[in-house]
Amino acid sequence: MKATDVVTTALGNTMRSKARTILTVIAIFIGAFTLTLTSGLGVGINQYVDRALEGFGDQDQIYVQKIADQTETTSQGPQKYDPDEAASDGMFGGMPMLSEGDIETVRGIDGVESVDPTVFVSATYLEAQNGDQYRLTLGAPGQSGSLEYAAGESPARDADEITIPSTWLDALGYDDAEAAVGETVKVGMTNVVGEEQDFDATISGVTDEMISGAGADPVPSSSFNEKLYDYQVSGGPDDTPQAYIAATAVVPDLDQQNQVKTDLSDEGMLGMTFEDQLGAIRGVINAVTWVLNGFALIALLAAAFGIVNTLLMSVQERTREIGLMKSLGMSPGKIFGLFSSEAVLIGLIGSLIGVGGGVLVGTVANAALTGEGGALSSVAGLTLYGIAPVQLLGIVVLIMVIAFIAGTLPAARAARKDPIEALRYE
Amino acid sequence: MEPAVLETENLVKVYGRGANRFDALKGLTLEIRRGESVAVIGKSGSGKSTLMHLMALLDRPSQGVVALNGRPVSELKNKEIHKLRNESFGFVFQQFFLNPNQTVLENVVLPLKIAGVAKRERNRRGMEALERLEMADKAKNKATDLSGGQKQRACIARALVTSPSVIFADEPTGNLDSNTSEVVEEILFGLQREQGITLVIVTHDDDLAAKCDRRIYLKDGEIVQAEEIHADSAGAPAQGTTGGEREDTSTGAHVAPAPQYPATEPWAAPADSDGPKHREEGTR
Ligand SMILES: Nc1ncnc2c1ncn2[C@@H]1O[C@H](COP(=O)(O)OP(=O)(O)OP(=O)(O)O)[C@@H](O)[C@H]1O
Ligand SMILES: [Mg+2]
């Protein structure tokens, strides 16, 4: 028997007892539908997280923090105050801080190209060429590499450069993004004792705001940011020790990142790549997704027994037909093939309808919940359901494999039937 | 004398074991020549169907040899046996075994479908077979819509469609009234005459048996009497086939060592291999 004939015959046979086939298909459908929804939920939320954090970091950056001393983070009641210890540790809101020495240590680690301590620069204003001044909040220099640019490029590390958001173009008096690039703006600063000074910066690029919110504020280059910070802390007593809550180390060679992380932890610091930070979030989402997928898989397991049951009945009913086909020279292998393709067909039909239904319901529900007027529409960029074609294909294949395995028992029973016994069967 | 298509030697079939042991066939030796029609006759339970199943390679003997065209089938691989059954044998069963959900044509082309013949070609050959049985107008009907005689004709068409060299029919007229039986018999013998198809017919029906070239009588798993009547010539001696029948193909001579038993007393037949040798000239 030809393969196409096996499939069409199997299809004809599944359609013979329609009610039974439909019920089995429904069982598969429920499993496939649920699995499509739960896995799509995982995809959707991961997509949201990716988008929400996009623009906040670059692949080659390692985020460095001081590791808290275990004894000091205990929450077993208040700690005794010791003036000497507290001063040397440098804590900020319960977080240990990086000292200048730590920054130097990081700078000395193999593979680290540059280190920027995280500093909070509060600029006073931004002044356009036309003399108008605007209130200014600066973005972190580290994110400049991963922003989306309408024109120009990210500010050069060592130059006095800055980006501006595309929404500011009008107010600053530029016709379009291209026109703004290369122009000069002034950033006004106030130091510790209240003196004001402004600093010139060249516009290196114009950013579009991303869903994550990155790119909504001007972003200075690292060196310009430091220059502003130096002025901001100037004017006070000179011996104020510098301490930072974190630093960003740039490690261009991605293969070296793991080594750098190990070196950091040897020095009592924690290094996390942007991927690590994302990974931690993804890990939680994936764990939850898999618990949900587990329920869907249980439904599929139950459906698999439905297939076994249906096909066993079908083999029993068709004993004579099997005997006839065998006596007409059909080999046991082909009989096995015929019945297992029936199982696979039931699986295929159920999974296609289930995956199709799941995608449809997931997409519609996502639109209803997160779209305009939906219950979750206030969360910008939220997606609850994502379509990953490979994953959907994987679900269909998985179900066909499950169906095939479920079909082996009845199919083997059919293949073993003795043609004579089968023909005698009343 | 035509060469033997099918031969058996000392064929034994035992069902069950221990206390349930049942010897369905107790050492049968016979041969069926190309183009002849042979009736296997005997009481219910005498082993007729068992014998037919062994000759049709549907079952394996407990002992003894079945040879096809002079070649013992035990030498054949399973795959070859399936192919042989599919291509060289046709089956007509008492209970029809038509698939009620399929059309007559679909039922008829089943052996071709199993053989892997393309759809167009198998439908063409199926229609040809149906036309030969004057059933072409029923091709698109469901198999259940047919009368008993039509069903049996559909079965014969199915048996014919692969152009087999042997057709096995187990009680082909058992379910039919006498008129319809005659039509079916006519068709079967017509095939034998016109296409030289060998017929092995298991039957209770003496009239049908009488129309065959030769009859093999079975009783309790043994051949008790066999005779050969030639439709075209009168008075050729009947001949026993019990025990070591051999054919000399070079001369076409047929050597049978067993004596002829009186037809009236088949139960009295001894399994005597020392009986007088009987030489018979080919007459066909
Ligand atoms: N699978 C089996 N197990 C045990 N005994 C069997 C089996 N098949 C057949 N027999 C026995 O073998 C004997 C011969 O059976 P067979 O079917 O060949 O008879 P038959 O001559 O065709 O009879 P009928 O005319 O009724 O069809 C019977 O006594 C039957 O009970
Ligand atoms: Mg029988």
Image (cartoon, grey):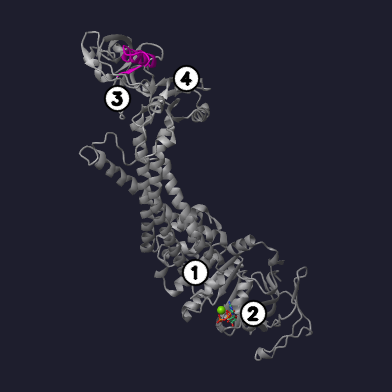
**Residue shown at 48%/78% (left/top)?**
B175
Front residue of B14 and A375: A375
Front residue of A211 and B284: A211
Q: Are marks 1 and 3 on the same chain?
A: yes
Mark 2 vs mark 1, foreground winner is 2
- Residue A357: give x, y in percent of width and height: 33, 49
Count residues near mark 3 (Cα–Cα under 10 Å), then give few for <14, some for 14-19, many for 20+. some
- Residue carrying label 4: A104
**Residue shown at 20%/11% (left/top)?**
A132
Q: Are marks 2 and 1 on the same chain?
A: no
The amino acid pointed to by label 1 is Thr
The amino acid pointed to by label 3 is Glu
| Label whose residue precedes the other's in the sequence (3 or 4) | 4
The amino acid pointed to by label 2 is Arg
- How far is disc 4 from disc 2 in space, using C-alphas? 92 Å
- Residue carrying label 2: B17
The amino acid pointed to by label 4 is Glu
- How far is disc 3 from disc 4 in space, using C-alphas? 34 Å
Say if mark 1 contacts mark 4, CB within 8 Å: no
**Disc 2 element:** loop
- Residue carrying label 1: A319
- Residue A29: give x, y in percent of width and height: 37, 54
Which residue range is magenta in the image? A218-239
Q: Looking at the image, is B161 positioned above or below residue A384?
A: below
- How far is disc 2 from disc 1 in space, using C-alphas? 25 Å
- How far is disc 1 from disc 3 in space, using C-alphas? 69 Å
- Residue A243: give x, y in percent of width and height: 39, 22
- Residue carrying label 3: A209
- Residue B267: give x, y in percent of width and height: 66, 90
